[in-house]
Image (cartoon, rainbow, N blue to C red):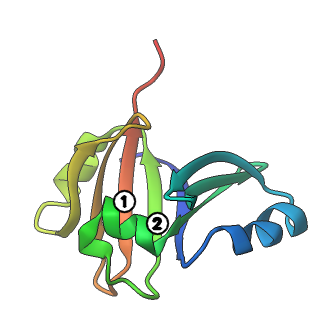
Amino acid sequence: MKLKKLTPALFVEAIEPCLPFWVDRLGFEKTVEVPHGDRLGFVILVRDEIEVMLQTRASVAEDVPALAGETSRSFLYIEVADLAPVLERLKGADIVIPVRSTSYGATEIAVRDPAGNVVAFAHFAEAA
């Protein structure tokens, strides 16, 4: 099983107050933004080889209702070269998000670790 990348996804009450810290102070660039109502619901921030995702709790509640009540847990997003070996290793795990294809081109699954943290694994098809 080859792991390619780890991206923390942080649940926040509102994204806009977080942007000055990440963008102005730390020099991250907002590369993706998804609205949720009249505010931002999700963003991807990138600097050098580091990527951080911010998602509002309201957006999470709509996107993955099973996570709606999460208050202080972490959500790790790991990109993998091939999802098949990961699925084999996750048999019997506490599945939070069953295997799904996303609008952003990933096939992903998410599980809860014994401490309650959510760990997602995603495969992106190579461009032809």
| Residue at the image position 45 percent from the left and 74 percent from the top | 57
Residue, disc 1: 120
Quarter of the image where one finds residue 89: bottom left
**102 relative to 8, above or below:** above
Of all residues shown, which one is farthest toward the top? 128
Badge 1, how many Cα within 10 Å: few under 14, some, many 20+?
A: many
What amino acid is labelled 2 in the image? Answer: Leu
Image x and y of residue 33, in percent: 60, 49
User: Toward the viewer: 5 or 15?
Assistant: 15
Mark 2 lies on a secondary structure that is strand
Instruction: Report if the CB atoms under discs 1 and 2 are less than 8 Å apart.
Output: yes
- The tag on residue 76 is 2
- The tag on residue 10 is none
| Residue at the image position 79 percent from the left and 56 percent from the top | 28
**23 relative to 82, above or below:** below
What amino acid is labelled 1 in the image? Answer: Ala
Query: If you read the primary sequence from the N terminus, does the residue marked by circle 1 or circle 2 appear first?
Result: 2
| Residue at the image position 81 percent from the left and 61 percent from the top | 23
Mark 1 lies on a secondary structure that is strand
Quarter of the image where one finds residue 103: top left
